[in-house]
Image (spheres, grey):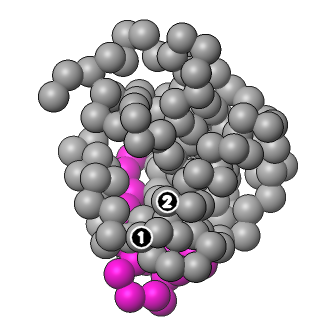
Amino acid sequence: MFSLVSDIDIRPTRFGAPTARALIAAAMADLGSRYGGEGDETPVESVEFDPPNGLFMIAWRDGVALGCAGWRSHGESDDVAELKRLYVEPSARGTGVASALLAAVEDAARSAGRVRLILECGDRQPEAVALYSGRGYERIENFGYYRDEPGVLSFGRAL
């Protein structure tokens, strides 16, 4: 597999911006096709991704939005960030976009003083599990909206 990471431009954007909303809708449709329902029903407010308590980003190549990801504060302390809405358009999968987005989220959360990044995904997302495992994420106790659902997988890593 090859990587085209060098030509990817990752830029912060508002969670509620039109391009972000379109990518998030595609992510929800993808999750819905894997798990049923409307996708991820975790409560998310757009302001949770406003600095300094979070950040949302879009990956671009040649003016085309390829994917998105963001982080928001998690819990009562300012130490932990939660990864949300990591998604890559099917046509861009396998080109390094997901890795670049994950690295950008990690860097942004670290720059905002977070020391740990956590996330939830599911057992019907083998490519996501491989990405996280390959970047040093380890299984942690399930948390969040789906913590008691079968097939939920939670991961965490020190930044």
Mark 2 in CB contact with mark 1 (< 8 angstroms): yes
Residue at 72% of width from left, 35% of height from top? 19
- The secondary structure type at the circle numbered 1 is helix
Residue at 27% of width from left, 42% of height from top? 135
User: Would you call the spot at circle 2 few (<14 residues within 10 Å), some (14-19), or many (20 or more)?
Assistant: some
Residue at 52% of width from left, 70% of height from top? 32
Which three-letter amino acid code belongs to the residue tagged 1?
Answer: Arg
- Residue carrying label 1: 34
Left or right: 106 in relation to 71:
left
Which residue is at the far left?
Answer: 1
- Residue carrying label 2: 30
Residue at 51% of width from left, 16% of height from top? 61
Name the one closer to the observer, 98 or 25. 25
Above or below 112: residue 75: below
Name the one closer to the observer, 46 or 93. 93
Measure the C-alpha gap from mark 2 to mark 1: 6 Å
Residue 48 visible to an observer of this rendering: yes
Q: Range of the magenta residues?
A: 142-158
Left or right: 13 in relation to 131:
right
Q: Position of residue 156 (x, y in %)?
A: 39, 57
